[in-house]
Amino acid sequence: MTALADRIDRLTTAIGRAVAWLALVVVLLQFALVVARYLFGLGSIWLSEAVIYGHATLFLLAAAWTLQAGGHVRVDIFYAEAGPRTKATVDLLGSLLLLLPFALTLIVLSLPYAARSWVILERSQESSGLPVVFLLKSLIPLFAVLMALQGVAQAIRALTALRAR
């Protein structure tokens, strides 16, 4: 089972590292947008939407990697001082009772939403906007799948830690 958790970790790490470069892209695009707007009086809906899409892609696809690295916000009044066994129990219950049901619900609810967008090849409402809204909406179920996978890996690691004693 730990081999499966390791594979999931490698997948989320690879995706997370790849999309981390979008942070640089988003900053550069936003800088170009600000320069164009305030120095030259030019605006670009296409560029503005590209910044939004890049930001959304970064956060949705790097979320599982962040969870794996322990970077998500945690209310750790007791967790920080807890022993390894208690932490493993909290991680296991959190994965099974909170993360996985949320991710599965999001998958069920977002798949038809994204599918409808693909059927009509949804575009931006702005005439000069990006014609790929359907791709952006597809990131929602993909986010949920990646989070569910990372939740499974987290549960496997917690079970392994609990069985170790």
Image (spheres, grey):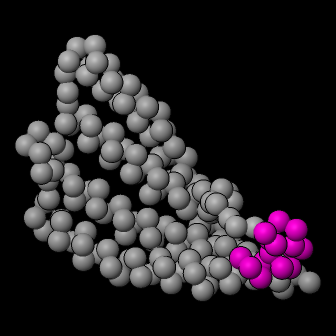
Residue reaching furthest to the top: 39
Residue 138: x and y, percent? 30, 63
Rendered position, 45 above or below 1? above
Considering the whole magenta stretch, tell me its main secondary structure: helix
Q: Residue at x 41, y 82 (%)?
A: 105
The reply to whether residue 4 is in sight is no
Q: Which residues are magenta?
A: 77-91
Rendered position, 98 above or below 60? below
> In terms of depth relative to the viewer, which is nearer, 17 or 140?
140
Residue 40 is a magenta residue: no
The reply to whether residue 33 is in sight is yes
Residue 16: x and y, percent? 53, 51
State left or right for residue 153 relative to residue 63: right
> In terms of depth relative to the viewer, which is nearer, 96 or 165?
96
State left or right for residue 160 relative to residue 32: right
Residue 10: x and y, percent? 61, 59
The answer to which image quadrant residue 133 occupies is bottom left
Instruction: State the quadrant of the N terminus.
Output: bottom right
The answer to which image quadrant residue 50 occupies is top left
Residue reaching furthest to the left: 127
